[in-house]
Amino acid sequence: MSLIISHHFTKIAFKPLSTNLFNIVLISFILFLGSNRMNAQDIKTKKTVVAPAIQRDSIKKNNPAKVEVASTVIKEKDSIKIDSILPAKPFLDGKVKYKADNYAKIDQKKKLITLYDKAELYYQDIELKSGIIILDYEKNEVYAGRIKDSTGKYTQFPNFKQGANVVEPDSIRFNFKTKKALIYNSRSEQGEFKIKAAVTKKENDSVYFLKKAIFTTSKDVDNPEYYFQTNKVKFIPGKKVVTGLTNMVIANVPTPIALPFAFFPMGKETSISGIILPSYNDSNERGFSLQNLGYYFALSDNYDLTVLGDYYTNGSYGMRFESAYAKRYNFRGNINVRFENLISSERGYPDYSKQNIYNIQWSHSRDSKSSPNSNFSASVNLGSSKYFKQSINQLNIGSNLNNTLSSSISYSKTFNTVPQVRMSLTATHSQNTQTEQINMTLPTLQLSVDRIYPFVGKDGLKKGFFKNINLQYNLNARNSIVTTDSLFFKPQMFRDAKVGFQHSIPLSTNFKVFKYFSASTSMNYEEIWYTKTIERNFDVDQSQVADKIINGFDAFRTYSFSSSLGTTIYGTFNFGENKKIKSVRHVMRPSVSYGYTPSFERYYDTYASDASGTMDKQYTRFENGIFGAPGLTNSNTLGFDLSNTFEAKVTDKDSTKTEPKKIMLLNNLNLSTNYNLNADGVTSLAFAPVRVSGGTQLFDNKMNVNFGTTLDPYAIDNSGRRINVFNINNGGSLFRMTSSNMTLNYSLSSKGKNDNKKDKNEQSLRNGGRADDLFGSNTDLGDNRVSQFDDEETAGEDKISEFFNAKLPWDMTFAYSLTYGNNNRENKIIGNSIMISANADITPKWKAGVSTGYDFVQKGVTFTQLRFERDLLSWRMDFNWSPFGNNANWGFFIGIKSGVLSDIKWDKRSVINR
């Protein structure tokens, strides 16, 4: 007896079967699955079991063959006491749901339910989808397998999901009661690993045993380019894989690389602590070495720690500590501390040297939403001036050629009072790697009180001269330190610190004059506090003038006055609606300013400049203060500024657009100078040089052009000193060009290839180098997993089809700089260089790049680097070569891309000439 329910018909079709017999079969099946089977001891002689009648019309038409099994048992009341023994536990703890596209077949005699074509079965947290599913409700087991399509090809492979674990085998056998399973040709993913096994035995929810298994990080587990093969595996999902004898296979060719056993951690949410294997290298200067041997500590979900070390046989060594931390919706950052003890040559040789270098980097940012009224951030890059030039574990030409390391740590807070108060505390650091001079502020305190308008009425309108009068208070307190690399964080560094406080109260207003002119005027009061001053005298013993440091509080007070008048002039030149260039718009913003600061001679004293004792020189005890000193003479100047912008309306190339296109001809063209009203023609001249600067963007804003020049109206004498004679009166032109410069920066790429991608050299920028790759790509010898080209494949991208469509992705960066000098009539080009960087995909898997340049003044090629990379699917191979110069070197790397197997690599590079 059997029942077939097919969803292809509008009504249910039965095999020849009497109605009574059909009801008996179906009632028996429902009672069985409902698990209300009664124990014989519980049924008394007069007890009757009644089941509700099943009507054919209760099944809706045109529904897929979907059956939900439930039962209803109605018991008659009986005066006889029922036995206290509990009824048997049902064999299933939940409801079973199933459906199929073709048919669902119930065989009561064999106790089987067969689902065919896109079959699905759901029970508790188990989901099973397959071409065919057979449920044996007598043995509490389910079988699933694939089916053949019309061409004879196997399709609809089983997909078994329990919780977060997914297995895709050829066939599966699963027991609902014991939760055990037998799986054939299973495929599953655990993190970056893909695992395939001929036979898999599921012992329980957390333990699997695999036979004849392979595991790989390749995308195609059925045809991987490499894999690890083993016969025995114990697999704990989300935690670990433990194997027996394991052999590495590349391109289906077994390699001699084998391990008697292997352990692979597979954390899902948290990382796993473990050893970082080193790379081997050798150097003629320092001998054989092991680089980047270390340990990774997965301390928590919020922070970690990596400890790495290098050792050379001549005694050189290096240590690095790297930590990243984050708290969701609050802050994130990372810290890198690097130390190297470098020994060159051998003790006793003339070229023997030993030195310690270090570098500290810290980056911290805070989510603005976590605390809207306060913020803390850090960007630190400090250390030895020669670190990036001599480090044995950093190859960063951009950082090497950079002359400045800078750092900043700041905390700011806004107090929502009336008026509002803003406070910031900042520590800064600036280090010149050439002179090894370090300038630091530890710290700088800035406090400002928002503007107060004392004459504004209740309506809040700020209109007119008096109502716009406002004042505010600013405090700038600073502890400034100037030291050198050798004295960094030594006692003398703090003894030479300078402390100062600058208080300022600006009083200002603005108003309109003759409707079209904007006028502003202000008066500023300043009070400066110092904790150190000087006393200058002639030292008879040393026969020279010497300054004596006087510790103690001292202060001076100054005030100044300034005003300005400006307007905006608009001019439009129309060429006609039928012209390609319809109109040009010129915007001018001229302004005139005046500033006056009186003399504060009362803060000046006299001293003897020689042994005669004649007090013929003046000085102020506040000299060399961090906020300057009061002026001996008054300042009385007029300033002239003119800014221009030029914009055009042109016919759009897109004929569907009706509005003309706006393009910027000149973003800015600025002229500025000033006139000294107190000039005497001897110690000072009236007119200052005219500074002209401008900039624009060309070729769809891909090229940035900036230029500037300085024009001096005065002539110079034979010693190069400016004299009170106009250049035109000295036989020259109206202005004498003393300097000029121009820079061009052009970036372009093939259509659609990362036109707006982020900075390529993010680590180089952090180290103080360039964001682009004009000085080559940054190479961290401790981690070669990152591509030199910073190019990630898009998921599902068909790179082969790109190749055959003759698409060749590429990008290029171009920079040109020209500097002219004529300050002392030298009249020559003092700087003229070009730099080019280009990267291209030669084939879908091959990439190549070059960075080079030429100095036309020095007549030589600047830094040059050649880069090549081969995408080997799960592997990556790259080669870089700097053929000449102080940084000549080469490096070769091949290794697995995946982070979990990043220690499987071969890395070889030449000695870096420092």
Image (tube, rainbow, N blue to C red):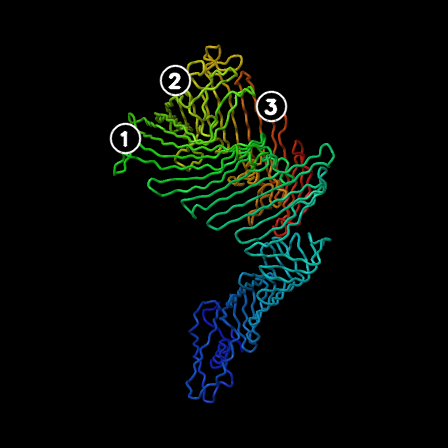
**Circle 3 SS class:** loop
Does the image show residue 574? no
Tell me where residue 600 appears, x and y as whole percent: 39, 23
Total numbered badges shown on the rendered structure: 3
- Residue 255, horizontal then vertical, whole percent: 72, 53
In the picture of the structure, the residue carrying the numbered disc 3 is 857
Q: For this rendering, which residue is in front, 485 or 218?
A: 485
Q: Which of the numbered marks, if any, corresponds to residue 677?
A: 2
Q: Residue at x 54, y 19 (%)?
A: 540
- Mark 2 lies on a secondary structure that is loop
Q: How far is the residue under mark 2 from the one under mark 1?
A: 29 Å
Marks 3 and 1, Cα distance to the nearest angstrom? Answer: 60 Å
Instruction: Report the quarter where the C terminus lies.
Output: top right
Instruction: Tell me where residue 675 sits by quadrant.
Output: top left
Whole-number angstrom distance, CA of label 2 to CA of label 3 = 42 Å
Q: Is residue 291 visible?
A: yes
Q: Nearer the viewer, residue 59 or 464?
A: 464
Residue farthest along the left direction in this orientation: 458
Q: Look at mark 1 in the image and give the residue it sits on.
A: 466
Q: Nearer the viewer, mark 3 or mark 1?
A: 1
Q: Nearer the viewer, residue 300 or 642?
A: 300
Under circle 1, the secondary element is: loop
Tell me which numbered mark, 3 or 1, is placed earlier along the sequence.
1
- Residue kind at label 1, given as amino acid type: Phe
Q: Is residue 422 left or right of residue 876?
A: left
